[in-house]
Image (tube, helix red, strand yellow):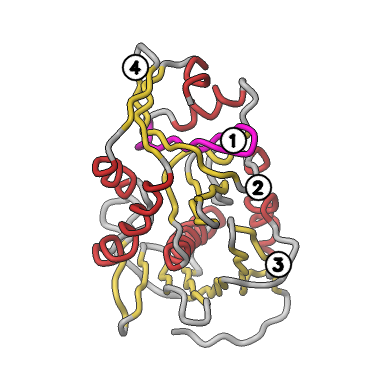
Amino acid sequence: MPNFQKEENLFEPVIKVGPLNVCFKGLRKERQKGFLDRYSHFLANSNVCDLTIKIKEENTEFLKDETGYLRLEESLEEGRKILLSTNFKGYEADNKGVSVLITSKKNNETTYFTTIENHFRWVVASELMKRGGFLLHSSGIAKGKECSLFFGSSGDGKSTIVELGKGRGGKVLSDDLIIVFPKNEDFIAYGAPFYGVLPQKEKEKKSYRIKSVYRLRKSEETKVKEISKGVALGLVVSHCQFVFNEKTRNELLIPIVMKFLEKVKCFELYFRKDDTFWDLI
């Protein structure tokens, strides 16, 4: 683990991530504009930190870039989880909620923020599970005080559903990643601050009670079909991102999703590219 010394000329924002406040330490002020361009919509009003990400730039070699594609590999170092890529090395949060991200000094502006984004998602996914929640690869639309989530792989229609729902007055949580978290006897959803295609300012920052969750299926007709809890468990777990470790999946994630599916019904939503699905959800 690297040693950190207090430096001047640092920008140290706090980002609201659903129920968590995530503090960033070690960002140089010349990175401030780039960071705010991505995350300013989710700046917190408090300096209280539930999770801290400390960033350090070093002349360090990480994974070899053999294919030209982004590689993310979870491993252990002295019993502690690390996430490795061609451009960074990230440590899981310790028992004080402090995670460390080491990036390469060779990274350009785009790669620098991509490394932050990937580490950010990984440590948040882990912290959510410790607190009984999870990160779902899905879009979300709120109607009144409740919301529906729509999950699937890339290209299955998550962004399309969001665009169609907006036309019927729906409030958008996200078109890609949703934070699912327990509250009293229910589960609630937040739009995640992670950077993607949908403009951040279009995401709702409030939480909404989850009414139902849907596996998207493109079709020539519009219909809804309930999925059994057993099948739903496998589908939902497979769409929880940044869980690389089988032991974590089996011992932590699966019990959480089982509790979630006791409260929230899962369906298949067959839909075509119009808003007729709106009256069925």
Q: CA distance from mark 3 to mark 1?
A: 36 Å
Upstream in sequence: badge 3 or badge 1: 3
Residue that protrudes farthest toward the front in the picture: 185
Residue holding disc 3: 29
> Which region is colored magenta?
140-155
Q: Residue at image x 44%, y 40%?
A: 138
Determine whether label 1 and label 2 are within 8 Å by CB. Answer: yes
Q: CA distance from mark 2 to mark 3?
A: 29 Å
Which dot, 4 or 3, sits closer to the camera?
Answer: 4
Which dot, 3 or 1, sits closer to the camera?
Answer: 1
Q: Residues within 10 Å of mark 1 (few under 14, many from 20)?
A: many
Residue holding disc 4: 219
Q: Residue at image x 40%, y 15%?
A: 222
Label 3: element kind: helix
Is 18 placed above or below 76 here? above
Determine whether label 4 and label 1 are within 8 Å by CB. Answer: no
Residue holding disc 1: 142
